Amino acid sequence: MLRNSDRNTQSIPSLLMSVNANIDKLDETCLNISLLDAAPAEWNFYQPLGDDKMGELVDSIQSIGLMSPIVVWQRDNSRYMILSGHNRVHAFRIIYDKTQNNQYLSVPAKIICDIDEDTARQIIIDTNWVQRELSAIEKAKSIYEKYVSIAGNKIRAKKGDGRGPTVFDDIAKYYDIGNRMVQRYYRINFLAEPFQEMLKSGAIDLKSAEKLAGFEHETQMWIYNAFPSQLDNKTIAKLHNVMTKSEIENVFLDAQKLKHHGMYLFKMYVPYEKKDSFEAYVKNYFVEK
């Protein structure tokens, strides 16, 4: 099993890869569900399965059994904290309540002993990232927690020239996603709660969320309260976090005027040598209309 002393010789990504590899090697056992405790909410910030998905999981377990054992952390009080498998344990409880079959009082599990709290938290994040279809907010929180873990342990040679892999590079490599996407999800953690709700509902997209997150919280709330009916992706795309409130207001006023007059702002680039002929074409088009 991984020892805490390994932190002195491994980067965080390779450290966690070795933890996950060790999990795969662990023997499987059965644990009574009465011995299991959920991870703290601040560690396990992922939404539980909805009723439909939970129903599918329950049906699957009853039909073919549990495909993947849960992963737990053995604590000093002879109890076990769930690191991976909160939904599966809940499904077992549902099935037992429905059937009273003692078979569902125990769940297949793999037990981890010699890890610290940070590694336990990272296992929760990693397994959810791999096993679940996460919302944008859940991905953002996962990236933020991963960033805090890596930056806080900073186990890499000092880069005197300021070059070399960054924390964002480490996370991008670890999760096999682009560095730019990692930074975008990281920034969304600074998005005001009303805009987080808009992102969750699909009212704004990821790019708009990142744009808004670049403003101070007070400015975000002012935008949300001052222009509630104009918060669409096209208008938000025109904002920049160096703008004054007056400049931001002008962006929304211009968008409102265009909409009121039934106009749509369309921009495109044309070859410079075609500029005059294109302008003439546009003018003739409106004269004909």
Image (cartoon, rainbow, N blue to C red):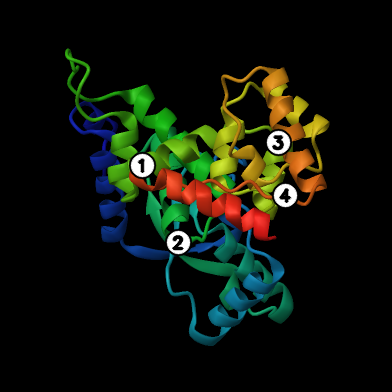
For the N terminus, which image quadrant? top left
Q: CA distance from mark 3 to mark 4?
A: 32 Å
Cβ–Cβ under 8 Å for marks 2 and 3: no
Residue labelled with disc 1: 272
Q: Earlier in the sequence, mark 4 or mark 1?
A: 4
Taking the spot 44% from the left edge, 44% from the top edge, the residue there is 276
Q: Is label 4 or label 1 in front? A: 1
Taking the spot 52% from the left edge, 49% from the top edge, the residue there is 280
Residue 231 visible to the viewer: yes
For the C terminus, which image quadrant? bottom right
Q: Nearer the viewer, residue 260 or 82?
A: 260
Residue labelled with disc 3: 193
Callout 3 amino acid: Glu
Per the image, label 3 sits on a secondary structure element best described as helix
The answer to which image quadrant residue 182 occupies is top left
In x, y percent, where is residue 104? 59, 73
Residue labelled with disc 4: 263
Q: Is label 2 or label 3 in front? A: 3
Q: CA distance from mark 3 to mark 1?
A: 45 Å
Q: Earlier in the sequence, mark 2 or mark 1?
A: 2
Taking the spot 69% from the left edge, 39% from the top edge, the residue there is 195
Q: Earlier in the sequence, mark 3 or mark 1?
A: 3
Callout 4 amino acid: Met
Residue labelled with disc 2: 131
Residue 180 falls left or right of residue 209: left
Per the image, label 2 sits on a secondary structure element best described as helix
Q: Is label 2 or label 1 in front? A: 1
